[in-house]
């Protein structure tokens, strides 16, 4: 037995069939030694349990040894396979099935990969880890076909990280039928963020750089301020515009600053990936 495959006894039936099925899908396999189709089916189920790595629990019940449990589930023939969720059978089959058919059955009831990404992202947001939530929300948004509820979670996170242009694109893609109260709230937040613009200090630095466009110390200073105020894209674009002309500008300080901004972004962040590739083209 592995952690994803268990033998059911009267002592563990409550915890493994009822309590576990409230946390994840439980696939119950009723079998017996004398049942040839059972013995053919079992290795397939065990293979899938290992492959799916904990997405479901395979619970094996020897029908000859556990007749009381068999009777409770109303099993009348072998092999019988049931899927349990929240303590109740939700699907299943009797007799033999091919591996492909069993996969299809499982995939109908198991969470999609994007659902797991979404759940993890929501947890990150609840913990205040917006940067870590962002790539997961992007993946869930794309893989779910731009579901409206995920779009709004994604937009909220983008607003928090001041990715205003992308937040505007995500909101614009929400269909009119899904433009509920939360959509209107996020739209208002976006408009306020766009109106707020940059701080007077940032605007003053921008004006200084406009007057002295080749002042590399000003470039570095402005890039640092951009990054600290969550304008990472502006910081990277500014630094890259000078690095593309001289990779060792300001004795390598601009490249170091560029790498620091990249490092401040979470792994998998689309902005980091974009500018890492740009830097790579300069290096090689």
Image (tube, rainbow, N blue to C red):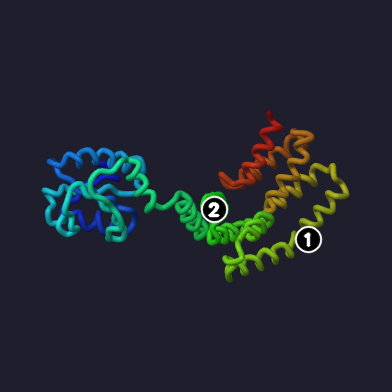
Badge count: 2
Task: Classify mark 2: helix, strand or loop.
Answer: loop
Task: Classify mark 1: helix, strand or loop.
Answer: helix
Q: Is residue 21 visible?
A: no
Extreme residue in the top direction: 284
Left or right: residue 121 versus residue 193 is: left
Q: Position of residue 193 (x, y in %)?
A: 69, 63
Mark 1 neighbour density, 10 Å: few (under 14) some (14–19) many (20 or more):
few
Q: Nearer the viewer, residue 130 or 72?
A: 72
- Sequence-wise first label, 2 or 1: 2
Q: Residue at x 26, y 59 (%)?
A: 18
Left or right: residue 114 versus residue 257 is: left
Disc on res. 111: none
Q: Can you tell which quarter of the image residue 146 is in?
A: bottom right
Extreme residue in the bottom direction: 181
Q: Nearer the viewer, residue 129 or 190?
A: 190
Disc 1 marks which residue? 200
Question: Which quadrant, please, contains the C terminus?
Answer: top right
Q: Position of residue 234 (x, y in %)?
A: 72, 49
Left or right: residue 105 versus residue 28 is: right
Disc 2 marks which residue? 145
Q: Residue at x 18, y 54 (%)?
A: 75
Q: Residue at x 54, y 55 (%)?
A: 129
Real-space Cα separation, disc 2 to disc 1, in angstroms: 40 Å
Q: Residue at x 79, y 57 (%)?
A: 203
Q: Position of residue 65 (x, y in %)?
A: 11, 49
């Amino acid at each position: 037995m592995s952690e994803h495959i268990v033998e059911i006894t009267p002592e563990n039936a409550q915890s493994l069939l009822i309590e576990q099925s409230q946390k994840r899908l439980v696939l119950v396999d009723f079998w017996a030694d004398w049942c040839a189709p059972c013995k053919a089916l079992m290795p397939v189920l065990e293979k899938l349990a290992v492959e799916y790595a904990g997405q479901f629990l395979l619970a094996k019940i020897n029908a000859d040894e556990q007749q009381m449990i068999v009777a409770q589930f109303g099993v009348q023939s072998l092999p019988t396979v049931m899927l349990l969720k929240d303590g109740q059978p939700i699907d299943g089959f009797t007799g033999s099935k091919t591996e492909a058919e069993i996969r299809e059955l499982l995939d109908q009831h198991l969470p999609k990969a994007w659902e797991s990404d979404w759940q993890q992202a929501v947890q990150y947001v609840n913990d205040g880890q917006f940067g870590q939530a962002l790539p997961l929300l992007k993946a869930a948004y794309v893989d779910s076909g731009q579901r409206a509820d995920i779009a709004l979670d994604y937009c909220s996170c983008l607003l928090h990280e001041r990715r205003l242009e992308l937040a505007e694109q995500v909101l614009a893609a929400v269909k009119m039928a899904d433009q509920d109260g939360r959509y209107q709230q996020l739209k208002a937040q976006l408009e306020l963020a766009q109106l707020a613009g940059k701080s007077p200090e940032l605007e003053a630095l921008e004006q200084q750089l406009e007057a002295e466009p080749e002042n590399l110390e000003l470039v570095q200073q402005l890039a640092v301020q951009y990054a600290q105020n969550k304008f990472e894209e502006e910081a990277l674009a500014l630094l890259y515009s000078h690095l593309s002309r001289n990779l060792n500008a300001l004795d390598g300080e601009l490249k170091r600053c560029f790498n620091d901004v990249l490092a401040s972004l979470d792994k998998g962040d689309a902005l980091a990936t974009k500018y890492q590739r740009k830097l790579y083209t300069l290096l090689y």
